[in-house]
Image: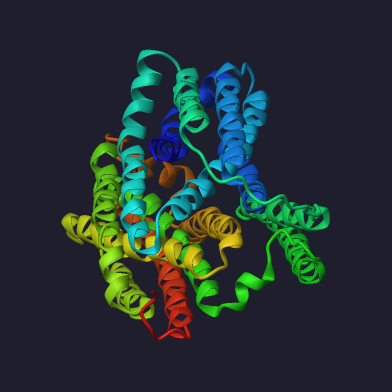
Amino acid sequence: MAAVFIATFMTSVEVTIVTTALPAIISELHGLAYQSWIMSAYLLTTAITTPIYGKLADAFGRRRVFLWGVLVFTLGSFLSGLSPTIFLLVLSRALQGIGAGAVMPLTFTIIADNFDFEQRANILALNNTAWGLSALVGPLLGGFLVDQLSWHWVFFVNVPLGILVLLLVWFGYHEKAPEKVSIQADWYGIAWLAVGLVGLLLAIQFLDHQTWLALGLFVIAIISFVLLVRRERRFSDPLISPKMFRNHTFSIQIITATILSGVLMAYQIYFPIWLQSLYRLSATEAGLVVTSSSVVWLAASFLVGPLIARFVPKRIALTLITMLLLIYVSLLFAGLNFPVWTFYVIAMLNGLGMGIIISMNIILSQHLVPENMVGSATSVLTLGRSLGQTVMTGVYGAIFNLMIRANLHSGVTFGQVNNIISAKHRGPILHQALINPIILTALHTVFFVVVVIIVLVLIINWLDPNHKVIE
């Protein structure tokens, strides 16, 4: 379990710590034109490999797949730190993602293997503590390493952690040897999944500035996913088994986790922008909004076990999703004088709702499938969460920029709006009285989209056929 907790911290801190170092990396490697790929390459290979590793873990056991993932992730971290050019850094980040595709879902799968249904919620809550710690420590550690050493150490810091996890798993994690099985490689399934995910994620990247290219990539992605579904229904040993989705409650857990992970990105990205641009708070003060949500998320995850032991999951989900709907609707009426403290309250309520619902999604998705599919089920849920975050981040960004451009008037330029977004711009700002309503309108539009998708997930959970406490 120590290895699982460290691995969770290692892979989750990777995102927060690298984000802090991005300006230094871009400046030194002259990589402004390719800066989005530093994150996208990692995310893309993670998304593609996650369901593949889930299938392999069910067939060959968790230990060897987990060891492979940690080894590749650690090697990718080391090579990222050594990278002398932006292109080699992007390739090394892609290698990191190939490793993370095994590590992230298998931490949840190993917990499911070693703890029964009643204990699992509390162990997942403890594992969430490692994730929460990364959210708190990552930005501080990243800033310290960049300021005192160099951006290279942002990647090197994961190497000793990876070696420690390898040693702990090698000597301390033992599992029953899985029954020897022969699996047929679902190469067509892997190919259609890869093409679909690459097409979808690239389309999101181009959505804002090359609309027709983005639409073409969306079409390719849709065709690939249709072909993937047809393939998985016909193949004897599919990459993603359609049998899992015959249980409607299981399907609802996957969809809910996917959509709410997209909602998560709205407040994580746009609350700090709202507070910095319109209230002129510092980046640190605005960042505390996200921190407050993470702290409440951790505390709330310890409530999941007692709640699902007493209440029907559908009722828990509907109650908390309704709460989320109400708090996001309130943002649509927030003006320029909306009290600052309400953002912290909304973020904490968001952490409460998300911490319970998404933890419940993980536990139920593992519980509702046969034992030989737990790895695949966990990887599908992890893939859904990654896609939800990636797709909605791109959608929100495109909507935010389009609304700003659509409302420019009276000599206000996009560059002037861009300057006021940063709290570092402390001097007098030309047209500030005109710019503030433009930013507020764009923010309202982003959160209107959030409200629409929360209504969607509320309807989906209303259709859950299960009316009993899960045992």
Relative height, residue 190 to residue 165 (above, below): below
Residue 460 vs residue 342: left or right? right
**Picture coordinates of residue 35, whole percent (x, y):** 57, 34
Tally of numbered discs: 0
Instruction: Write the residue at 44% across / 34% down.
Output: 10
- Residue sticking out furthest to the top: 149
- Position of the C terminus by quadrant: bottom left
Instruction: Write the residue at 25% across / 62% down.
Output: 303
Residue nearest the viewer, comparing 393 with 198: 198
**Picture coordinates of residue 89, whole percent (x, y):** 62, 26
Relative height, residue 341 to residue 65 (above, below): below
**Picture coordinates of residue 131, whole percent (x, y):** 37, 44
Q: Is residue 280 visible?
A: no
Residue nearest the viewer, comparing 177 with 226: 177
- Position of the N terminus by quadrant: top left
Q: Is residue 213 visible?
A: yes
Residue nearest the viewer, comparing 434 with 88: 88
**Picture coordinates of residue 204, whole percent (x, y):** 62, 54
Type of colouring: rainbow
Residue 162 vs residue 185: left or right? left
Q: Report which quarter residue 300 is drawn in.
A: bottom left
Relative height, residue 75 to residue 65 (above, below): above
Instruction: Write the residue at 32% across / 44% down.
Output: 132
